[in-house]
Amino acid sequence: MYDKSIFKKAFEQYDAIVAVFATGIVVREIAPLIVDKWKDPAVIVVDSNMNFAIPLLGGHHGGNEVVRKIAEIGPIPVVTTATEVHNRNSVEGIAKVLGCDIVNKPSTVQVNCALLDEDVEVLEIKGPKIVIVGDDVSVLKKEKAENS
């Protein structure tokens, strides 16, 4: 049920929020709550007639995945993240598949842009090693150490 504090409560408690509201209402309510793409929950809007499901925030952070699940019951998914629109992988998607955390999160902007134009090589380096990278290199770290 809607009340003025519902989005604030949801932002504090959930990784993804599905709002069956008009997009304008959701945008106005979440605007003061938005902090960072790495911390904010995915926010998905579904119109009240179940025609469309739109990830407003967090497309690469679970929103696109939620929209695809919602599409199974009818609404058309409206995905706008550039990598997915062009059927390309994103750094976030690659990290998820490989079970990794992204160490240098700001790098994903440049690397995702590169992924739109070309295949970007994924290298696995086993240590001990010292690795020096530029701002246009995303560094992924395995979430759990592998048993050797």
Image (tube, rainbow, N blue to C red):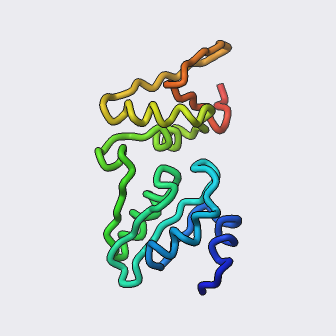
Measuring 36% from the left and 43% from the top, which residue is drawn there?
A: 83
Q: Is residue 140 left or right of residue 20?
A: right
Farthest residue, direction top: 129
- Residue 145 appears at what percent x and percent y? 67, 32
Task: Please tell me in which quadrant of the rendered image residue 76 appears.
Answer: bottom left
- Residue 8 appears at what percent x and percent y? 67, 70
Q: Nearer the viewer, residue 32 or 37?
A: 32
Q: Quadrant of the C terminus?
A: top right
- Residue 69 appears at what percent x and percent y? 42, 66
Task: Please tell me in which quadrant of the rendered image residue 28 appears.
Answer: bottom right
Q: Nearer the viewer, residue 55 or 69?
A: 55
Measuring 64% from the left and 54% from the top, which residue is drawn there?
A: 35
Measuring 52% from the left and 39% from the top, which residue is drawn there?
A: 95
Farthest residue, direction bottom: 1
Q: Is residue 27 above or below residue 107?
A: below
Q: Is residue 112 above or below residue 26?
A: above
Q: Is residue 86 above or below residue 64?
A: above
Q: How many marks?
A: 0
- Residue 29 appears at what percent x and percent y? 58, 72
Q: Quadrant of the N terminus?
A: bottom right
